Image: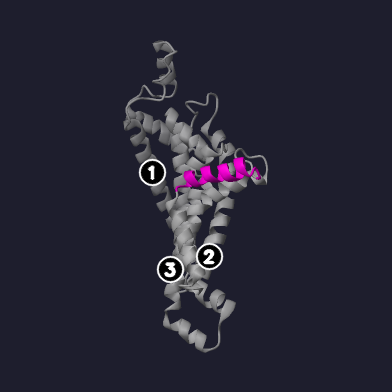
Amino acid sequence: MIGLVIKRFFYGLVVVWAVATITFFLMHSVPGGPFDSEKKFPPEILKNIQAKYHLDQPLWKQYGFYMSDLSRLKFGPSFKYRNRQVEDILAQTFPVSMYLGFWALLIAVSFGVSAGIVSALRHNQAFDRIAIFLTTLGISVPSFVLATLLIYLFGHRLKILPPALLEDWRHYLLPAFSLAAAPSAYLARLSRSTLLDTLGKPFVQSVKARGVSGARLVFKHLLKNSLSPVVTVLGPLVAMLITGSFVIEKIFSIPGMGRYFITAVTNRDYPLIMAVTIVYAVLIVLMNFLVDLCYAALDPRVRLK
């Protein structure tokens, strides 16, 4: 087990390094720079600013400076948020996105898996047809459209939920549901299809012949043999929800990491863009490793080597 962790840790470092390298050179390949719009500064001051952030150096030297800081877990100062380190911005915004993502994940898994199970057990019945329609709608409607509709309905027309900002638990409801709608619909479709496939296998008929039915059949025999595909998508899904939806945080004026990322892209804030990208890559690597561990727990035939 220790050898597996060390091996995966090394592979994870390689993946994060590759993501950081590709992102770095892609950003700098786009024409323009982060301070090109600062027309109010004289050319001499702009040169001093570029020298301060090493932007006057060749690209390979800038890459060396950045990787040196990254090896010490330093992302450097923000270009647009003056006198603020990127690490401080992440420390302030990541907990907000994580908390919002936690509630969105809880909603997505609870509603999605439950709806998929009931839909599969009531195959071709009224609930199944309604569930298929709703999940298709949930996957098809973009999150920003759903968020706008929820704000209009519950925030402005009914006035029962706050339409923006984060002050108490009620402020998390609309963005959490907006963020969880598409993952919930996808998990419902996936749970339904995998459970239907499991229901058609010979061992299920054998279990039913022994008189096992109801909740015992579902939770003891069906779910454990059907959840592997669901666990597969949970890895990147958890990372996506925890880091926060960029659009959802922007719509609801949530001071999370996603909202800062959009602002960073607009402002060409290289260090902040790199930091958010690397955090996302680290979460993806970590979640995929946890998914592999869950495989072994769900299916004894899977052995991690």
Residue 287 seen in this snapshot: no
Badge 2: how crowded within 10 Å, few (<14), some, or many (20+)? many
**Region rendered in magenta:** 142-160
User: Percent x, y for residue 49?
Assistant: 44, 18
Report the residue marked by disc 2.
115
Report helix, strand or loop for mark 3: helix
Badge 1: how crowded within 10 Å, few (<14), some, or many (20+)? some
Report the residue marked by disc 3.
193
**Number of the label disc, if any, that sits on residue 147:** none
User: What amino acid is at disc 1?
Assistant: Val
Residue 99: within the magenta? no
Residue 153: within the magenta? yes
**Number of the label disc, if any, that sits on residue 19:** 1
Badge 3: how crowded within 10 Å, few (<14), some, or many (20+)? some
- Left or right, residue 195 beside residue 94: left
Disc 2 to disc 3: CB gap under 8 Å? no
Q: Earlier in the sequence, mark 3 or mark 1?
A: 1
Task: Kindly indicate the quadrant of the structure image that contains residue 114.
Answer: bottom right
User: What amino acid is at disc 3?
Assistant: Ser
Task: Name the outermost residue toward the front.
Answer: 157
User: Percent x, y for residue 179?
Assistant: 52, 49
Q: Earlier in the sequence, mark 2 or mark 3?
A: 2
Distance from label 2 to label 3 (Cα)?
12 Å
- Left or right, residue 136 beside residue 101: left
Residue 82 seen in this snapshot: yes
Distance from label 3 to label 1 (Cα)?
34 Å
User: What amino acid is at disc 2?
Assistant: Ala
User: Percent x, y for residue 182?
Assistant: 48, 53
Task: Name the outermost residue toward the bottom.
Answer: 210
